[in-house]
Amino acid sequence: MNQDNSNEWLGAEAERDDKPLMVRARKFSRKPASNSRLPFLLVVDFTYEADDNVGLPNDIQYNILDEFEKNALDEMEKAGSLELVFIETCNGLVRYYSYVADVSAIVNQIDDIISGSSDFNFSSNFDPDWLEYGKKISLVS
């Protein structure tokens, strides 16, 4: 993950629908300078079949997620085209919240990396003030 403007990643656990909710959130040491440069919230959802009643990914699914984070998200952060800010994992879904400048370009890059896997879905909103990040981080900090 890009370390230029980040202080730390926070981890939290909670429950949602009687299932564990695992959260990773970026805590910035100062207000991100990239707000105006990365005005679009891009949410990438990875859905998986939960093997048990806990609803968290199994080892194979964690390996897929780890490769996705390394090959897509980390590389895009290094290039400055994406800032990953929040990740939720619960009951068959991992949701990655990031901010980007060009949604189509990032989605196309990710789609190339994941080879069109139907386990990934995308949604986006114009959020130049990073309001969604503000809501999410207030829940864990």
Image: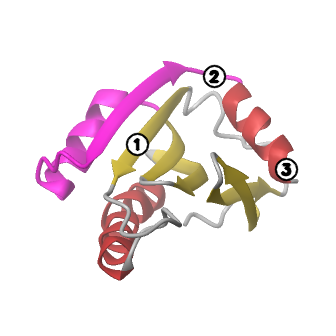
Query: Distance from label 1 to label 3 (Cα)?
Result: 25 Å
User: Is residue 65 positioned above or below 125 on the image?
Assistant: below
Q: Which residue occupies 55% across, 51% down?
A: 84
Front residue of 116 and 110: 116
Q: Which one is in front in this view, the residue at disc 2 or the one at disc 1?
A: 1
Label 2 crowd (10 A; few <14 / some 14-19 / many >=20): some
Residue 77 position within the rendered picture, expressed as x and y whole percent measured from the top left: 47, 57
Report which residue position mark 3 lands on: 30
Front residue of 40 and 23: 23
Left or right: 136 with respect to 112?
right
Helix, strand, or loop for circle 1? strand
Circles 2 and 3, Cβ within 8 Å, touching? The answer is: no
User: Is residue 86 positioned above or below 129 on the image?
Assistant: below
Report which residue position mark 1 lands on: 44
Query: Distance from label 2 to label 1 (Cα)?
Result: 18 Å
Q: Which residue occupies 45% across, 31% down?
A: 101
Residue 38 position within the rendered picture, expressed as x and y whole percent measured from the top left: 55, 33
Does the magenta portion include 126? yes
Please give the range of residues in magenta.
Answer: 101-129
User: Is residue 117 positioned above or below 131 on the image?
Assistant: below
The answer to which of marks 2 and 1 sits earlier in the sequence is 1
Q: Amino acid at mark 2?
A: Pro
The answer to which of marks 1 and 3 sits earlier in the sequence is 3
Report which residue position mark 2 lands on: 128
User: Is residue 83 positioned above or below 102 on the image?
Assistant: below
